[in-house]
Amino acid sequence: MRVLIIRPEREATALATALAERGHTPVIAPLFRLEFLHPPAEFSAALAACQAVLLTSANGARALAEASEQRGRPILAVGDTTASTAEGLGFSAVTSASGDGAALAELVRERLDPKDGPLLHVSGREVAADFGDLLQPAGFEVKRFALYDAREETALPDSARAALEARALDVVTFFSPRAASVFASMVEDAGLTANLHGVTAVAISPAALAPAAGLPFKAVVAAERPSRQAVLDEIDRLAEAPVQGQATMSDTSEPVPPSSAPPPAQPVPNQPVIVRRGLGVISAFVIGVLAAVIVLAAALISLPFWPQQARDLWRGHAAATPPTPGIDLQAVRADATAVATAAVDTARRDLTARLDDLEKRLRAVSATAAERPTAAPSGPDPAVADLRIRVEALEQRPAASGAAPAPAPAPSNVEAEKEIAVLTREIAALRATLGALDQAVASQRDQAKALSDAVGAKNSGEQKALVAARASTVIGVAARLASSIDAGVPFAAELNLLVPLVQGDGKLTEIISALQPYAQTGVASRAALEAEFPAVAKAALAEDVADDSYGERLLAKLRGLVSLRRVGDVPGDSTEAKLARAEQALHAGDVAKAAELVKSLPAQTNKATAAWLAKADAHLAAKRSLDQLAAYAVNLLGTAR
């Protein structure tokens, strides 16, 4: 299945890797840019006083890890993905509710006592439900802190637009109501609503699908459990068999209370699902065999209308290759192509000879008609010359008397009229003969065109099948390259998979050449660049000396020993302000903006930032080439259709 992923970049990459491992083709088009927010002043005290932290998304776990170094607080997570993310970030006491917001609230009521202290809810700026309202009847106090924000993109990403325009998608996934709402709005603004008729919506919960219920999806499917694994299982089931109607759904990236979820039977009407599969190499081969069989059948049906030489060639070939129990399909296709090509060539030669003969005869008739013979008839066509002499004799009779013509006797008039009538009939017969010759020529041309079209249709079908198989292979390799680049590991083996697909393609050659310098060693991942940046910023501040005064040198030494600098969205053009904004851009996943800010620092900081900038530039160059490869693959899919 070709699956559109609209989650933020980090989650989209993880989901794309899981889909590629299952044999699906991911198309990544994030609709949000994740940005971590600085915690308010009272956050540290609230964290120290709470008895447990509630996490309703994996981004909440990452935001908590950014905001505090504490890892020992008890964590109650909404689902298994959020729990595993928290454990990977070093939190030691993590418990998963394995459900939605209601399941997390029930877990709190079962495990915790309101008397042991308040709860702290780490969330995004926008939430689907307030745990204060859910847990207040049980006596719990919940303090919510928004530590991250998912900023919406202004328009539908190019990768999603291209895939929808080419009708190259089978599935679109929704993990939150907000994502569904933004997707619906962007698709309507782009005028691509009608392109969703062949797409199945797979949602993690009924609430996650409700904002997109008005879109004309082919069908809607829900996860049996509110987890990413359940969504992957639903996509696998779509690839295996048709899905009828709408299944039960539950889960979202933010909790949704039962009271706010729409009835399961009402989000969108039941619609039948027809599974759309990608075209693999085996399918391309089968289509090629079917095309060859169709060409053979067409040849047998049209055999009586072939020229004699083509029929003789066909019969001789057929006699020379009797059927055997073990048929080589490749040999059959090659033989069919050779026979069809030979038949077309023979027909063309025969038609050319006949046309040349007709042209010679027409030129002879024209030359004869242009002559005015005075003696015995001569020329290539004696009958036409004789007719010409007889007509001229009739025309000259009145002039032979010398004076004004007198009325001729009646018998002479009758005889002249008979001769004129005979001549008229003979001329009409000649015209009919020429018309019959023209029709014969036209018929031969039509037969030749039919044979040529049959061969062209076969070649066109095979070409489309090969292009589709090529596009699917490129998309699979692109997904593997994306995983390697995001992990910061070498990707020479993955890049070598593209070499057999070049076949003189200048664009693909350009992309491979751009990635080749980084293949053996890999490029630094975004996480690695972010981890190295504090040390780079510290060194850059230490070297930012305005003059050689003793005070400035002493200040540089102190900056090299003690890391004292501001962070966040610090205004101004000072080195410290630019470093702060660059670090904030890295937290938000915008490596390009961070690199641009670092490059704008004073020249004296170049020594401290040069190595980091080289890694950042390599990362950005690899990502640009990967984006070009993904767009190239989507364009190939559109061409194959």
Image (cartoon, helix red, strand yellow):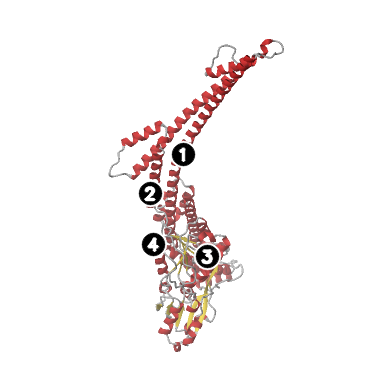
Mark closer to the observer (1, 4): 1
Q: What residue occupies the far left of the structure in this picture?
A: 325
Up-down: is 467 above or below 81? Answer: above
Q: Nearer the viewer, residue 29 or 101?
A: 101
Query: Amino acid under label 2?
Result: Phe
Q: Position of residue 101 (x, y in %)?
A: 46, 77
Q: Amino acid at mark 3?
A: Leu
Residues at badges 1 and 4 in contact (C-beta under 8 Å)?
no
Which corner quadrant holds the N terminus? bottom left
Gap between marks 1 and 4 measured at Cα: 40 Å
Q: Residue 287, relative to residue 593: is it above or below?
A: above
Label 2, secondary structure: give it.
helix
Q: Which residue is mark 3?
A: 215
Q: What residue do we see at 68% from left, 10% from top? A: 401
Mark positioned earlier in the residue sequence (1 or 4): 4
Which amino acid type corresponds to the residue marked 4 in the rendered image?
Ala
**Of the two numbered discs 3 and 1 in the rendering, the one whose residue sits closer to the viewer:** 1
Q: Real-space Cα distance between discs 3 and 2?
A: 36 Å
Which of the labelled discs sits on residue 241, or is there none? Answer: 4
Badge 1, how many Cα within 10 Å: few under 14, some, many 20+? Answer: some
State the SS at label 1.
Answer: helix
Amino acid carrying mark 1 in the image: Ala
Q: What residue does disc 1 label?
A: 450
Q: Compute the Cα span from label 3 to label 1.
A: 45 Å
Nearer the observer, disc 2 or disc 4? 4
Q: Position of residue 508 (x, y in %)?
A: 47, 50
SS category of the residue bearing label 3: loop
Helix, strand or loop under label 4: loop
In front: 87, or 529? 87
